[in-house]
Amino acid sequence: MKKFSELTEQEVLALAITNEEEDSRIYRGFAEGLREAFPSSAKVFDEMADEEVTHRTMLFDLYRKKFGEYLPLIRRQDVKGFITHKSSLWLMRPLGLDEVRKFAENMEYEAERFYRKAAATARDASVRQLLIELAEAEAGHESLAHKLTETILTKGARAKEDETARRMFLLQYIQPGLVGLMDGSVSTLAPLFAAAFATHSTWETFLVGMAASVGAGISMGFAEALSDDGSLTGRGTPWLRGAVSGIMTTLGGLGHTLPYLIPDFWVATILAIIVVAIELAVISWIRYRYMDTPFLQAAFQIMVGGTLVFIAGILIGNS
């Protein structure tokens, strides 16, 4: 890799041309990824991609006047300390609207900052002037993005897209996570407390709880991942939903399993019951907050189900 300070004026201009082309393709990728769910934002990125193409054409016209037709291949990754995009966000599906907006803003800001910093250390006057012009161009991109957002992404369009983003967040994260948490918190109660009251051994109870929690997490993870591929429902990638559901299921079971690391049986059991009550309250709050279920109704439903499973575990353990 070459240092930026070692680049010739020709290489700096060639690098700027390559960057403009790459940024245009990134914006086009954002537009394609957002087009179905967020058409107004997709149009913004289409316009930004077109502007990057215009800037590349202007830069290439200048390059041809100074250096001719041959354009050396030099990219971000060829220059030490230059900006690199560590994440191929534009290739992911589905795309998160807020994440894409933030990524695009960082692209323009980082490019401008780098050019200004490079200009401050450049010794050659022509290179310094070129870097300053590039920095101004990047600042212009940021102004363009703001202008396009105001003219295309109106309040009504933004509100509609924000609601779509909220719905996708619910489908991709909250719903599978809530299902997993409910399953882990409730389904593991019976085997855990059955083992506790059957053995009165905190260690054996802990092992049963661990097995039940991990087993339920794996089962729920695969069940969620295999339920659908998300292409029609918009629920996101299967592996992501499966991971969220599996992890939350395991955590739901571990919450009231960990107290049985305490050697004293009754202290561990009382603490486990308190943890169960907290878990059920959290589940009720999530249903109230994200699923528009009245809190008292959600709490009643969860408490009744949890209590029945808890009693079933105690009865089985004492039989």
Image (cartoon, rainbow, N blue to C red):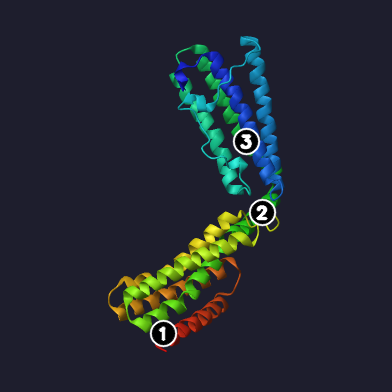
Q: Residues within 10 Å of mark 3 (few under 14, many from 20)?
A: some
Q: Residue at x 53, y 59 (%)?
A: 244
Residue at left 51%, top 15%?
Answer: 127
The amino acid sitting under disc 2 is: Ala
SS for dot 3: helix
Q: Provide residue 24's location: percent of width, then percent of height.
A: 65, 32
Return the residue at label 1: 317
State whether residue 256 appears in this view. no
State the SS at label 1.
helix
Find disc 2 in the rendering and name its residue. 159
Could you tell me if the residues under marks 1 and 3 are in contact, i.e. CB atoms within 8 Å?
no
Determine the image quadrant of residue 226. bottom right
Q: Locate residue 66, reporting x and y percent.
A: 62, 10
Q: Earlier in the sequence, mark 2 or mark 1?
A: 2
Lower sequence index among marks 1 and 3? 3
Would residue 32 be visible to someone looking at this image? yes
Q: Quadrant of residue 120?
A: top left
Query: What secondary structure is marked by label 2?
Result: helix
Q: Is residue 313 found left or right of 204 in the rendered image? A: right
Residue 29 - label: none
**In which quadrant will I find the C terminus?**
bottom left
Q: Is residue 51 left or right of residue 2?
A: right
- The residue located at (67%, 33%) in the rendering is 49
Give the residue type at disc 1: Gly
**Residue pictured at 45% horizontal, 18% vertical:** 5
Which mark identifies residue 26? 3
Q: CA distance from mark 2 to mark 3?
A: 25 Å
Q: Nearer the viewer, mark 2 or mark 3?
A: 3
